[in-house]
Amino acid sequence: MQAVAQELTEATGIACRGIACDVTQADQVAALISAVLDAFGRIDILVNNAGINIRGLIEELSPEEFQQVMDTNLVGPWLMCRAVATHMKERR
């Protein structure tokens, strides 16, 4: 992850960092936002691009697998938006 961030920094001249986060976990989302604010001082944009799909027949998909998809694809973006909302509103 850090190697990709370094490659992006070198290619663009813009400081980049790689920070791991499970977007389904509110505490990890909060830690991510804190790390970004510590490193860069502000958040200008949020791109929610984490997503999963578990392929198979609906009758074979377990409730736990369905919940994992919903948590990643729906709850994750909601947690991220909620976590950055105050900072982004302050910056307009």
Image: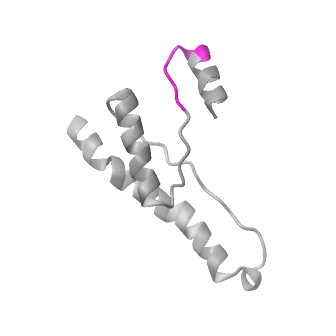
Residue at the extreme left: 90
Percent position of residue 31, x then y: 41, 47
Estimate the x, y position of residue 66 in percent, counting from the top left: 63, 75
Q: Quadrant of residue 36?
A: top left
Mark yes or no: residue 45 visible. Answer: no
Judge by depth and name the residue closer to the eye, 29 or 84: 29
Q: How many marks?
A: 0
Q: What range is drawn magenta here?
A: 10-17
Quadrant containing the C terminus is top left
Camera-side residue: 73 or 22? 22
Q: Main secondary structure of the magenta part?
A: loop
Q: Is residue 18 left or right of residue 32?
A: right
Query: Residue at horizontal 55%, vertical 69%?
Result: 70
Can you give x and y, in whole percent of width and height, for residue 54 in the image?
72, 67
Up the image or down, 35 lies above or below 67; here it is above
Q: Is residue 14 above or below residue 44?
A: above
Q: Residue at x 58, y 74 (%)?
A: 67
Residue at point 66%, 74% (across, down): 65
Q: Any magenta on residue 12?
A: yes
Q: Position of residue 27 (x, y in %)?
A: 42, 57
Residue 73 occupies quadrant? bottom right
Q: Quadrant of residue 51?
A: bottom right
Q: Is residue 82 above or below residue 13?
A: below
